[in-house]
């Protein structure tokens, strides 16, 4: 199928890129809220075992409770006593809400497309950094973390695709 036929088929099925983007944002938000729940529960109860705690090398609680779980203080960007020293999952929750709102606004104002791209690129860079830490420093596989990274990659691809389609339409 060509691009036009493929787009027409998706539109006929009631699918559009905005709906898909917002769905991915909702999935990312759900993942982030679950991560916050796990981190809070593990801090409050040392016997807590999350569904994502499978074994010693596949434990989301271990990752969330590590110093890397609050990346801004770990990097020295904020002090540990700062109000901004919050779990990565809280920032993820804010990110998914913010990028979802920006996507809605982008349908009415084109300048938000560039903001979406910048935010999604930033999320990819942070995801790559955190993935490196998970794999090589913590020696852990965090299913919740990797799920959020997948959401970030998907949002990035959606943002790039949207800009390419708009450029293609403009060039016609």
Image: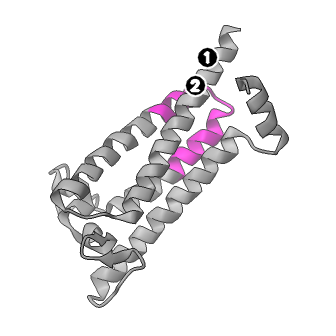
Residue at far top of view: 172
**Residue 80 found in image quarter:** bottom left
Query: Percent x, y for residue 51?
Result: 42, 79
Q: Nearer the viewer, residue 22 or 90?
A: 22
Assign the N terminus to one quadrant of the image.
top right
Task: Name the magenta segment's main secondary structure.
Answer: helix
Q: Residues within 10 Å of mark 1 (few under 14, many from 20)?
A: few
User: 94 left or right of 162?
Assistant: left
Up/down of 29 relative to 129, above or below: below
Q: Residue at x 68, y 34 (%)?
A: 107
Q: Which residue has dot 2 on it?
A: 163
Query: Percent x, y for residue 127?
Result: 34, 48
Residue at far front of view: 1
* Label number found at residue 167: 1
Q: Residues within 10 Å of mark 2 (few under 14, many from 20)?
A: some
Q: Nearer the viewer, residue 87 or 121?
A: 121
Q: Nearer the viewer, residue 144 or 46?
A: 144
CA separation, marks 1 and 2? 6 Å
User: 62 left or right of 37?
Assistant: left
User: 169 left or right of 65?
Assistant: right
Query: Percent x, y for residue 36?
Result: 40, 70
User: Which color scheme does this rendered protein use?
Assistant: one colour
* Label number found at residue 67: none
Q: For the magenta stretch, what is the residue range? A: 97-117
* Contact, mark 1 vs mark 2 (Cβ under 8 Å): yes
Q: Secondary structure at mark 1?
A: helix
**Residue 123 found in image quarter:** top left
User: 125 left or right of 148?
Assistant: left
Q: Residue at x 52, y 45 (%)?
A: 99
Q: Residue at x 25, y 72 (%)?
A: 62
Residue at far right of view: 12
């Amino acid at each position: 199928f060509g691009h036009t036929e493929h787009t027409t088929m998706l539109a006929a099925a009631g699918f559009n890129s905005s709906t898909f983007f917002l769905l991915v944002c909702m999935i990312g938000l759900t993942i982030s809220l679950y991560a916050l729940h796990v981190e809070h529960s593990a801090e409050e109860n040392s016997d807590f075992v999350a569904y994502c705690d499978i074994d010693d090398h596949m434990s989301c609680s271990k990752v969330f409770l590590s110093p890397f779980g609050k990346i801004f203080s770990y990097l020295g960007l904020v002090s540990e006593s700062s109000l901004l020293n919050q779990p990565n999952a809280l920032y993820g929750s804010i990110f998914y809400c913010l990028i979802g709102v920006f996507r809605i606004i982008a349908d009415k104002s084109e300048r938000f497309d560039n903001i979406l791209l910048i935010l999604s690129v930033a999320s990819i860079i942070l995801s790559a950094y955190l993935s490196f830490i998970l794999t090589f420093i913590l020696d852990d596989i965090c299913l919740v973390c990797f799920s959020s990274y997948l959401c970030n990659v998907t949002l990035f691809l959606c943002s790039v695709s949207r800009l390419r389609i708009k450029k293609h339409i403009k060039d016609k």
